[in-house]
Amino acid sequence: MIFDALMYNFFMKKNIGLYVHIPFCEKKCDYCNFVSFCKSDDDKLKYMNALEKEIVLQGEKFSKLEYIVDTIFVGGGTPSVLQNGEIERLISNLRKHFDVDKNAEITIECNPNSLTIQKLQEFKSAGVNRLSIGLQAYNDNLLKLIGRLHTKKQFDMAIKNAKQVGFENINVDLILGIPKQKICDVKKEIKHLIKLGATHISAYGLIVEENTKLDYNLKNAVYKLPKESTSIKMYDIVLKMLKRKGIFRYEVSNFAKVGYECKHNLKYWTDKEYLGLGVVSSSYIQNKRWKNTDNFLKYCEFFEINSKGKTDLSEIIEDEEILDLNAKIEECLMLSLRTKDGIDLIDFEKQFGVDLLKKKKAEIEELSKNKFIEIKNNRLLCTDAGFKLLNQIIVMLV
């Protein structure tokens, strides 16, 4: 009977990822429209206390539902701006109230200028085993132009200190298509990251969001974006230079050495469940999506008023949606095609009852003829050329 109970738990427990949002920054970057704030230490403390109460409530609920946490991603904002000890306290509370796998991937986002030896030692002690460092550009003039506070020298020191403390799994974020950025800038930064021994690089095309300082400066001709053809060439250079050094693209904007892919982010692209904690964080569980309020004050006051443990969180939940079959199919196509593995056609038909090769026969033949997609081992994949036209391909196949 004991054996049966153990086997039941082994087979019935489900994996889930946790995303924890820390919405604080020293300064808002010129391109950023994320929910992030420059707040006082008192406001930060109020938020962390509110977050702890959400962790208690959600942890109790999801532990009862037999979920095991196999990834934790602490993002922002800039989590590394918190006072010393706060991240250790946060992860300790997550372990206390959720069933966290002992080998869970635990990532924290950091900026180079706030990544001190003391902070790194704290992260290591707390069980963090993956860092995601926001470099964005390895050029001080470009960093200043987009409102970043760090320098390339501070980035180099952050990497050196991280390795000294014992971190091996380190992602570096880059932005392509920055105003005044040149092809030679991209070549230099990739060459430098390879020299530093980078294991994971995320290279995102710059998106101009409305009502940001970047948007204002472009509209007022303070500077202009590179030509689209130049930005595409930048991406091609990243792809080729990294591939030659064994750092492969596994998602349209993400490159890693084998074994260093981000397990947490893979959940988003492969229809796996995750729970968001904190202001504006999103969740996806049992075909239902929702997100927490983006109102900082509302979030903090809810948990302050309900300090004795109100279990109904509906007052701070927004945009709740149960996905129907068509929405699930659309999401599967949109997200799977972003990855190197593409769509498993056999699994797709089993899950949705749709033979994609028959339903989209004409579109697939046209895309294949133009070498934008290929079919290998019952998988429909984007080619290198196809990744550049990903949005158009998705529209054709949805």
Image: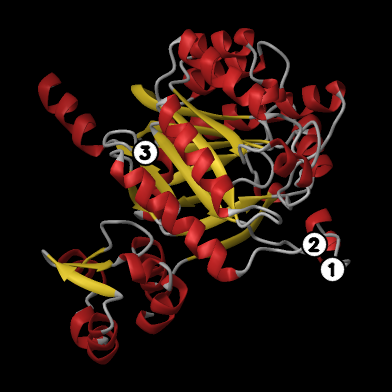
Residue type at tag 2: Asp
- Residue 215's disc is 2
Q: Mark 3 points at which residue?
A: 263
* Real-space Cα separation, disc 2 to disc 3, in angstroms: 33 Å
Residue type at tag 1: Lys
Mark yes or no: residue 306 visible: yes
Q: Quadrant of the N terminus?
A: top left
Q: Foreground: 367 or 98?
A: 367
Q: Mark 1 points at which residue?
A: 219
* Real-space Cα separation, disc 1 to disc 3, in angstroms: 39 Å
Tag 3 secondary structure:
helix
Q: In this view, does 364 lie above or below 192?
A: below
Q: Which of marks 2 and 3 is nearer the N terminus?
A: 2
Residue type at tag 3: Lys
Dot 1 and dot 2 residues touching (CB under 8 Å): yes
Q: In this view, does 322 lie above or below 87?
A: below
Q: Is residue 376 above or below residue 184?
A: below
Q: In which quarter of the image is the C terminus?
A: bottom left
Quarter occupied by residue 231: bottom right
Residue depth check, mark 2 versus mark 3: number of the one nearer the observer: 2
Quarter occupied by residue 66: top left
**Percent of width and height locating residue 99:** 40, 25
